[in-house]
Image (spheres, rainbow, N blue to C red):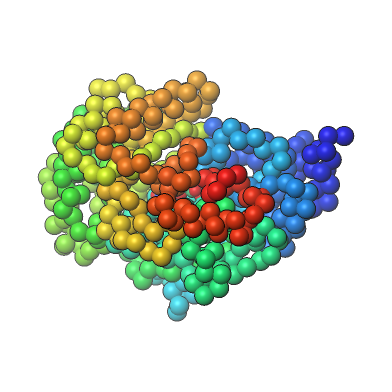
Amino acid sequence: MNPILSENRALRDIETVLLPGDPGYDEACLAWNLAVRQQPAAVAVPRTVADVRAVVGAAASRGMRIMPQSTGHAASALAGLPLDDVVLLRMHEFTGVEVDPVARTARVLGGTLWQDVVSEAAAHGLSVLHGSAGDVAVAGYVLGGGLSFYGRAHGLAASSVRAIEIVTADGELLRVSAEQHPELFWALRGGGGNFGAVVAIELDLLSFADVFAGMLLWDLSHGPEVAHAWADWTASVPESVTTSMRFMRFPPMPELPPFLSGRELVVIDGAILEDDERAAELLAPLRALEPELDTFARIPSAGLLAVHMDPPMPTPSVSNHSMLSGLPREAVDALIAVAGPGVEIPLMFAELRHLGGALARPADAALARLDGAHALFAIAVAPTPELLELGRRSTGAVVEALRPWSTAGNYSNFAEHPIDGATLFESEAWQRLVGVRDAYDPGRIWVAAHAVGGR
Ligand SMILES: Cc1cc2nc3c(=O)[nH]c(=O)nc-3n(C[C@H](O)[C@H](O)[C@H](O)COP(=O)(O)OP(=O)(O)OC[C@H]3O[C@@H](n4cnc5c(N)ncnc54)[C@H](O)[C@@H]3O)c2cc1C
């Protein structure tokens, strides 16, 4: 018998493991990004720390590698990687949140989604540094840095992490913090899933229950005027303001509200951490452009998850990304030329997120800061191989058009395509990360979205 196959069969002793052909295997391998087909040697769906340790011990002793994944939002970063010696460790059944309202912290289990943490925090009048989509998992987001609409005021979500519980390559469960295993704690905040299976994360919460947030929406014919105005505006707003600007395209779909269905739009959205009067004063120059829809208002902070209108369910997609060192008029014109009104380009959206503020100030973590003034992200829906290829070309064209203003770097969470992991970090941090990987995973057992120091 093929030695790998016989080793795989031995994994059948582990209760949570499914092999190809087993009922439930295909479903357990499904990634959020439905354009990616994952066919690992085995998939495990643990529900406890003991389950995770059993899988790690069994896989490691058989010379197999382990790919932790919570939702598969970033599965496309691994597309094309042979998985015939890999156990996919799907954490989506291992979820739960406990909030300590006095310490203002949350303890979140390995596969928990942001929407669950946000609503649990909201029940105590607290908020958290989540991203735009509620069905992204805390683990992958925080391990990659975590860019929130509170980010310019409060920094990367990774800097709100107090402790991480992790099962390492030797099957040990470690509690990692600034005091315990500090080098691993430093590496995990930005260094991704290269060091073990994260089974719990302790996060600081934010002590407010509501926020001034929303979106402004225009027909894409207003794209040039709005994009230039937003670019100028982002150069002057205080750190309390974190927003994005997108050129969006929606096919006619009955499940979409009429203001989206079949429309091409320009949308500005985000959060302003100011009182209502000051927030309205800050928004005035954009409101003067007379948006067709203006939802900016004080809302319960849990409502921020709906503001960005991310796809509410698993979606086949392809994306591309870059970091921009600045956004002069010529850069905005280049975006308009490639994705603005009148251009036939099959994109769901081309987005710019405003960075800087606390996101740019160095923290003591592997991803110390986001190096760039704006992050560019382009995404296309890709339900067929032909549309995947077309989407790859279209999203690539957007990134290419803004190449003159791009840094050489990438942001892990927006790089949902295969990249050189070294481009995510400053060179000193990269060397240090490789050292931590050598110490905690010398056998290169872990398969992460973006590899540190080789797969
Ligand atoms: C609709 C949408 C909106 C988004 N909005 C934002 C945003 O506003 N800000 C932002 O920063 N990012 C955003 N992202 C990107 C998102 O944060 C990344 O794709 C992130 O990696 C997703 O984490 P996940 O755990 O859900 O995905 P997964 O694909 O499951 O995980 C990604 C990687 O994280 C690691 N990992 C995940 N879980 C574990 C674990 N338990 N133990 C060890 N390693 C683990 C693995 O290396 C894995 O390959 C968005 C993505 C989408 C699709």
- Quarter of the view holding residue 32: top right
Q: Is residue 356 left or right of residue 67?
A: left
**To which quarter of the image does residue 362 belong?**
bottom left
- In this view of the protein, which residue sits in the foreground, 322 or 42? 322
Q: Is residue 79 above or below residue 452?
A: above
Question: Residue 364: which quarter of the image?
Answer: bottom left
Residue 67 at least partly seen:
yes
Q: How many marks?
A: 0
Instruction: Determine whether 421 is above or below 157 in the image.
Output: above
Q: As rendered, which of 414 and 420 lies closer to the eye? A: 420
Left or right position of 325 against 421: left
**Where 297 falls versus 121 (above or below)?**
above
Residue at figure coordinates x 22%, y 42% from the top left: 327
- Residue 213: percent from left, percent from top: 28, 55
Residue drawn at point x = 45 percent, y = 77 percent: 103
Q: Where is residue 224? Give x, y as percent.
A: 18, 33
Q: Give the percent coordinates (x, y) of residue 186.
A: 48, 63
